[in-house]
Image: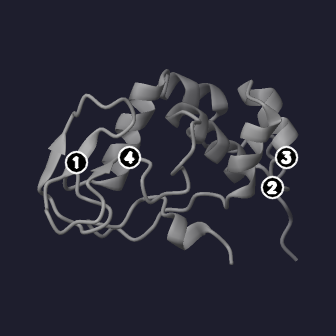
């Protein structure tokens, strides 16, 4: 019979370290972009690398230049569990941290209290599945809604 570890502290990232690493939404978005597109930004629908970057649009920062592509404008959130959410990137990282470090899951009330958002807003991330890394292909998103949502 294997005995459980008696350590009160296991190594890993703490919430304090997470907030130091990602002090704002811009830093968190940069991390999401690097994780999602390690070889360069590509269209989430057609996979084309012919992408215009840094558009002046507030939420849709990228545009696919392929004429046949059904989605012309997209963001880092497009095609992920974050799509359609107004919750910021830093808050999404906090939600992911809480979900992955919690033994029993995270309630929408806890997210509401911890993030300072309405319970309705907190219900959206808590009802979506916990983000998991997808395959490392060029066009597959890191936190794909297709691979994480349960049927």
Label 2 element class: loop
Horizontally, is 40 left or right of 94 in the view? left
**Callout in the foreground (3, 1):** 1
Camera-near label (4 vs 3) is 4
State whether residue 24 is above or below residue 106: above
Q: Which mark is residue 107?
A: 3
Cα gap from disc 4 to disc 1, whole angstroms: 11 Å
The residue under label 4 is: 76
Quarter containing the N terminus: bottom right
Secondary structure of residue under mark 4? loop
Mark in the foreground, 3 or 2: 3
Spatial distance from mark 2 to mark 4, Cα to Cα? 40 Å
Verify CB contact (< 8 Å) between mark 4 and mark 1.
no
Q: CA distance from mark 4 to mark 3?
A: 26 Å
Please say if the residues under marks 4 and 3 sit with CB atoms less than 8 Å apart: no
Tell me which numbered mark, 2 or 4, is placed earlier along the sequence: 2
Q: Residue at x 72, y 38 (%)?
A: 121
Residue at the location (45% across, 67% down)? Answer: 134
Where residue 76 appears, as percent x and y from the top left, is: 38, 46
């Amino acid at each position: 019979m294997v005995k459980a570890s008696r350590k009160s502290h296991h190594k890993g990232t703490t919430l304090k370290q997470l907030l130091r690493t990602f002090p704002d939404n811009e830093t968190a978005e940069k991390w999401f972009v690097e994780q999602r597109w390690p070889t360069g930004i590509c269209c989430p629908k057609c996979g084309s690398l012919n992408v215009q970057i840094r558009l002046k649009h507030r939420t849709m920062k990228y545009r696919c230049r392929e004429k046949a592509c059904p989605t012309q404008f997209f963001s880092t959130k497009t095609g992920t569990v974050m799509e359609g959410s107004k919750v910021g990137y830093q808050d999404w990282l906090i939600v992911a941290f809480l979900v992955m470090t919690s033994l029993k899951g995270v309630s929408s009330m806890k997210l509401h209290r911890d993030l300072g958002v309405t319970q309705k807003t907190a219900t959206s991330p808590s009802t979506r599945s916990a983000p998991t890394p997808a395959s490392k292909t060029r066009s597959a998103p890191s936190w794909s809604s297709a691979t994480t949502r349960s049927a």
